[in-house]
Image: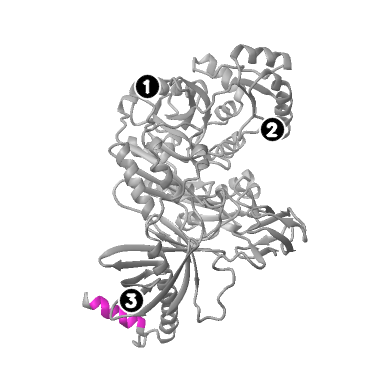
């Protein structure tokens, strides 16, 4: 087993990995940029090293600096978390070259999955269902026209080297094809230095369902059930659940077996996720493979009872998977909300700043993976994900009610968050019925329905006045207690409170 | 103590006086007995006739909201005895209005020039934070009196970016 692991990340996922290290008796090493000195992962780790300025390219994305820190502190493995360098084959390779174990797949598997057309060719051979389309770059506008006519409009043009929606065009009819192809090719060339574009049948409002897999370095691969990820805003997942309301045991087994074939065809090791699009007839098609730990991994942990980060570390250390496919049992239901620093009154725009008040939920069936604390200033330089709140229950109904209860307990003051948005999603009748697709959130947000009309407006008015008075009193008593500290002479507000408590 | 309070734009006249262990409260002429404890800064526990409420205060540089359970209310307060009662705090539309930075960020560019006529809701400036660009919109119809923000400058919440007359 490793003695020391460096975590090449920040925020809640760095804290998550540090906790796993502590549980396994492994020393943990944080790295941080100029603006993250006071961040939670630095406080929680056994060691922490500065790696550069706020700009990620000069700190968390800088392979040379990260490896230098690993070497200097004697780390024998690196966990990349998600985002940043986690899906960069050059980083995986550089770790291997430096003799530090990368906790994730080898560079070759990552490279294969990074090229959409190469991945499609490989998956076609492995007999994995693919969205109808081409598995090679389009050679000409004529070829594009013929293929599109064959598979039928609407079609989607996609960059072979793509990601993040760049070089992607939805084409509704033959007349739009040529200009869209040219635009996609030049955009792909600019974004990725590779203008290759291929075509797929466009699926309108499909479900987005992904399958978690684990593969050890001895040829064993298992699937750990699916995650329903259809609730997205601006192509970003915001709420995920496991199991999916749309998947039954037979479909789960078919998807799981397809995901295992995907992983094996790529020579994949460690934890990975195979993403599928699912149409209204519940046909599923391979979309892509995420070659890292996912943000939403906790929901799988709750329904399987497994710790994915422990298993990632054990697999990287050369251990065999301690269970077989038959040993994986799903139990209960888990739902995750991604708590972002963003303003629901201002089009969900990021809202960094100082957290002046933090009331955290707890109680039955609640897990909170957080990177924030009261008094911390959320930097303006990174992704606005603050924490993940996960509700677990015997069934979906109980998971929803526990999560709703916990969201009502959760309070973050000083900055704006999307907590209220989740209350709205969870009480939506279609969500409760499990009837939704990737277009659901956009439709919900357009409906502009606010929080239920508050019957407590008068309470708010009374509270506003009370805050004004009590603020002054507590400010006065703070000043007084700092002046008279230790001499037993208490200010009057304090005396009054203690007396009141003694009576009760 | 006497306060004029606006909650979600609705006006309240509130008188508060300390009673033995509670507060005697007159709200728009109605009398209530209120038991209140500041559990910690920004968290108030209120009992009225045995019914319990927890009220949380969300303060940012530009506004204040109160949460009563899951419901959120915009709150503005004016103490009539105070000569420094803020103009515009209760939502008056007249007079010059300041556009303040709602978050820390960087000014990307101005979308209008001084002297331009603008509509309510029209974008005045673009501020970038957390890799996203945000339009700061005019709170009213009027004329841009001043653009205070400099392109490329870092701003903090509450900094005045522009004034619309």
Label 2 is found on which chain of the structure? A
Identity of the residue drawn at 63% across and 61% down: B101
Tell me where residue A149 sits by quadrant.
top right
Q: Secondary structure at mark 2?
A: helix
Residue under numbered circle 3: B23
Does A117 appear above or below A470? Answer: above
Label 1 is found on which chain of the structure? A
**Measured Cα–Cα span from mark 3 to mark 1:** 64 Å
| Camera-side mark, 3 or 1 | 3
Quadrant location of the C terminus of chain A in the rendered image? bottom left
Q: Nearer the viewer, residue B78 or A52?
A: B78
Residue under numbered circle 1: A253
The label shown at residue B156 is none
Q: Secondary structure at mark 3?
A: strand
Please state if A450 lies on the left or on the right of A306 as rendered: right
The spot of residue B143 in percent (x, y) is 73, 61
Asked if labels 2 and 1 share a chain, the reply is yes
Q: Mark 2 and mark 1 in contact? Answer it, CB < 8 Å.
A: no
Q: Secondary structure at mark 1?
A: helix
Identity of the residue drawn at 60% across and 63% down: B157
Tell me where residue A145 sits by quadrant.
top right
Q: Nearer the viewer, residue B136 or A268?
A: B136
Give the magenta part as a residue range.
Answer: A493-502
The spot of residue A437 in percent (x, y) is 47, 31
């Amino acid at each position: 087993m490793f003695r020391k692991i460096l975590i090449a990340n920040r925020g809640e996922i760095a804290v998550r990995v540090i906790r796993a290290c502590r549980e396994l008796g492994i020393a943990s090493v944080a790295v941080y940029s100029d603006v993250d000195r006071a961040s939670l992962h630095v406080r929680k780790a056994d060691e922490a090293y500065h790696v550069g300025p706020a700009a990620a390219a000069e700190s968390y994305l800088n392979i040379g600096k990260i490896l230098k820190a690993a070497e200097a502190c004697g780390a024998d493995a690196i966990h990349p978390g998600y985002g940043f360098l986690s899906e960069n084959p050059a980083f995986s390779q550089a770790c291997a070259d430096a003799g530090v174990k990368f906790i994730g797949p080898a560079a070759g598997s990552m490279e294969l999955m990074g090229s959409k057309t190469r991945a499609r060719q490989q998956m076609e051979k492995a007999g994995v269902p693919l969205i109808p389309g081409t598995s090679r770059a389009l050679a000409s506008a004529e070829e594009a026209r013929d293929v599109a006519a064959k598979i039928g409009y609407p079609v989607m043009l996609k960059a072979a080297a793509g990601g993040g929606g760049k070089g992607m065009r939805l084409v509704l009819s033959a007349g739009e094809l040529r200009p869209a192809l040219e635009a996609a090719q030049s955009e792909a060339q600019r974004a990725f230095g590779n203008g290759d574009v291929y075509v797929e049948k466009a699926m309108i409002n499909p479900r987005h369902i992904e399958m978690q897999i684990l593969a050890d370095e001895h040829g064993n691969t298992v699937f750990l059930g699916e995650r329903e990820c259809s609730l997205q805003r601006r192509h970003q997942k915001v709420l995920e659940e496991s199991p999916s309301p749309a998947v039954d045991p037979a479909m789960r087994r078919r998807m799981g077996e397809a995901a295992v074939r995907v992983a094996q065809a790529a020579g994949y090791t460690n934890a990975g996720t195979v993403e599928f699009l699912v149409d209204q007839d519940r046909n599923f098609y391979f979309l892509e493979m995420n070659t890292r730990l996912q943000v939403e991994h906790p929901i799988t942990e709750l329904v399987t009872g497994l710790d994915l980060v422990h298993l990632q570390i054990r697999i990287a250390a050369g251990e065999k998977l301690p269970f077989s496919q038959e040993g994986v049992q799903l139990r209960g239901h888990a739902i995750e909300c991604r708590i972002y620093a963003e303003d629901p009154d201002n089009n969900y725009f990021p809202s960094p700043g100082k957290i002046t008040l933090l009331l955290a939920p707890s109680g039955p069936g609640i897990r909170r993976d957080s990177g924030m604390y009261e008094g911390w200033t959320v930097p303006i330089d990174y992704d606005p994900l603050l924490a993940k709140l996960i509700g677990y229950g015997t069934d979906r109904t109980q998971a929803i009610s526990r999560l709703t209860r916990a969201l009502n307990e959760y309070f973050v003051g000083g900055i704006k968050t999307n907590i209220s948005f989740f209350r709205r999603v969870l009480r939506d009748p279609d969500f409760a019925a499990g009837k939704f697709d990737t277009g659901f959130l956009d439709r919900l947000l357009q409906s502009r329905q606010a929080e239920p009309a508050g019957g407590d407006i008068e309470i708010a008015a009374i509270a506003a006045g009370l805050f004004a008075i009590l603020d002054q009193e507590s400010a006065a008593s703070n000043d007084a207690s700092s002046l008279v500290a230790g001499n037993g002479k208490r200010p009057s507000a304090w005396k009054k409170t203690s007396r009141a408590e003694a009576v009760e | 103590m006497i306060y004029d309070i606006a909650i979600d734009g609705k006006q309240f006249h509130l008188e508060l006086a300390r009673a033995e262990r509670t507060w005697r409260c007159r709200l728009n002429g109605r009398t209530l007995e209120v038991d209140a404890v500041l559990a910690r800064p920004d968290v108030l526990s209120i009992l009225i006739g045995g019914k319990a409420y927890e009220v949380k205060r969300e303060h940012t540089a530009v506004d204040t909201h109160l949460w009563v359970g899951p419901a959120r209310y915009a709150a503005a307060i004016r103490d009539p005895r105070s000569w420094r009662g803020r103009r515009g705090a209760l939502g008056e539309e007249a007079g010059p209005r300041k556009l303040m930075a709602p978050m820390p960020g960087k000014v990307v560019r101005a979308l209008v020039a001084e002297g331009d006529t603008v509509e309510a809701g029209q974008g005045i400036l673009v501020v970038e934070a957390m890799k996203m660009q945000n339009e700061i919109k005019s709170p009213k119809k009027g004329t841009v009196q001043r653009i205070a923000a400099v392109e490329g400058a870092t701003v903090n919440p509450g900094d005045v970016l522009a004034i619309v007359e």
